[in-house]
């Protein structure tokens, strides 16, 4: 189980592992573009989407030593796709009335549910971590998969003002960081293995996101209460850009062998600019999100299908 069309990640500081070595867990960088092709469609630029993209990288710190189990005290949600770049459901136009707060009610409800599921999943993983060995059974894998953050992604509407959207994406990235720390790379495997055989970042990089989530939720709710929303058509560039930013967050936490740790603390600019592919047999790319090239196509039955060429 990996990213996007099937995302995966870790949740809070699940083990003492997490607490001991993840208080300063760094963000995860999205690798250089080398991803699979996708059907292209040219979308028009939207206001405020062409600022110079950031590197999208967060410096990595020295990986903490193999952790010791410690209970997690924060909540997690339902299963769906994984990051890696495949497809992401298109967003529907938000209601014309009720403002941003009303449009985001489903999002915050999903966040609460996913948070609780992540706590349960983290406790199950911690229970399997012994002094010498780590044991993961099928029921633990099922709990982690049930904490996938995709329902929250599906509930992010297009048309929020930039500040509110950024606050909402930060909350979402907290969830994906925690999920990635539990389910990223190849850390979560059924069976018993020596603790020393685990990757150095397995089950460690979700602690910071777990600790910061409550304040991030408060900030996003305050921003929503003070702002309105401009309904966007499902096939609009504005709707596509929401999907692209969500996919970037998924990739940064679950794609290319990552294991959580990335929080979207800065804007992820989208620049629409068609560019020929390095492979003549592949279609051109449609632009960049956070500096990573992407392809985007609108499907009336599925919404925007987006692909980031990150690895």
Image (cartoon, helix red, strand yellow):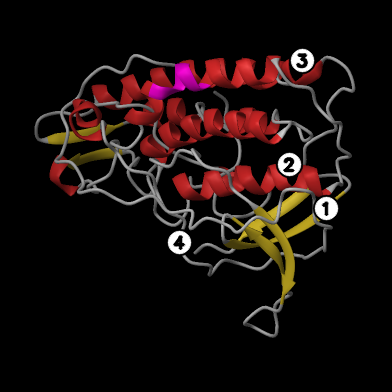
Asked which secondary structure carries label 3, the reply is: helix
Asked which secondary structure carries label 4, the reply is: loop
Q: Residue 298, labelled with which disc? A: 1
**Which residue was labeled with disc 2?**
89
Mark 2 to mark 4 CA distance (whole Å): 23 Å
The numbered mark, 1 or 2, whose residue comes first in the sequence reads: 2
**Which residue was labeled with disc 3?**
102
The numbered mark, 4 or 1, whose residue comes first in the sequence reads: 4
The span picked out in magenta is: 212-216
User: Does 106 appear in magenta?
Assistant: no
| x then y, percent, for residue 237 | 81, 49
Question: Could you say which is closer to the camera, residue 303 or residue 210?
Answer: 210
Question: Could you say which is closer to the camera, residue 197 or residue 68?
Answer: 68
**Which residue was labeled with disc 4?**
31
User: For residue 184, what is the image quadrant?
Assistant: top left
| x then y, percent, for residue 149 | 55, 31
């Amino acid at each position: 189980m990996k990213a996007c069309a099937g995302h995966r990640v870790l949740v809070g500081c699940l083990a003492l592992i997490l607490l001991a070595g993840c208080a300063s867990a760094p963000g995860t960088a999205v690798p250089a573009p080398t991803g699979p092709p996708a059907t292209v469609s040219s979308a028009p630029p939207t206001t405020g989407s062409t600022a110079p993209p950031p590197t999208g990288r967060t410096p990595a710190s020295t990986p903490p030593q193999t952790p010791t189990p410690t209970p997690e005290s924060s909540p997690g949600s339902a299963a769906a796709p994984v990051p890696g770049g495949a497809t992401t459901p298109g967003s529907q136009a938000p209601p014309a009335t009720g403002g941003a707060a009303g449009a985001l009610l489903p999002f915050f409800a999903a966040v609460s549910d996913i948070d609780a599921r992540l706590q349960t999943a983290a406790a199950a993983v911690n229970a399997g971590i012994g002094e010498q060995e780590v044991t993961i059974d099928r029921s633990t894998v099922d709990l982690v998969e049930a904490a996938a953050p995709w329902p929250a992604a599906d509930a992010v509407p297009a048309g929020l003002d930039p500040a509110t959207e950024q606050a909402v994406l930060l909350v979402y990235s907290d969830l994906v960081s925690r999920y990635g720390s539990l389910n990223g790379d190849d850390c979560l495997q059924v069976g018993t293995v020596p603790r020393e055989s685990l990757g150095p970042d397995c089950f460690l990089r979700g602690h910071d996101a777990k600790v910061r989530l409550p304040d991030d939720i408060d900030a996003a709710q305050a921003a929503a209460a003070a702002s309105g929303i401009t309904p966007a058509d499902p096939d609009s560039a504005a709707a596509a850009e929401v999907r692209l930013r969500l996919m970037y967050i998924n990739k940064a936490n679950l794609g290319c062998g990552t294991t959580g740790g990335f929080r979207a603390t800065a804007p992820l600019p989208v620049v629409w600019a068609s560019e020929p592919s390095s492979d003549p047999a592949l279609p051109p790319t449609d632009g960049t999100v956070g500096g990573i090239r992407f392809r985007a196509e609108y499907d009336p039955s599925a919404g925007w299908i987006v692909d980031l060429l990150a690895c």
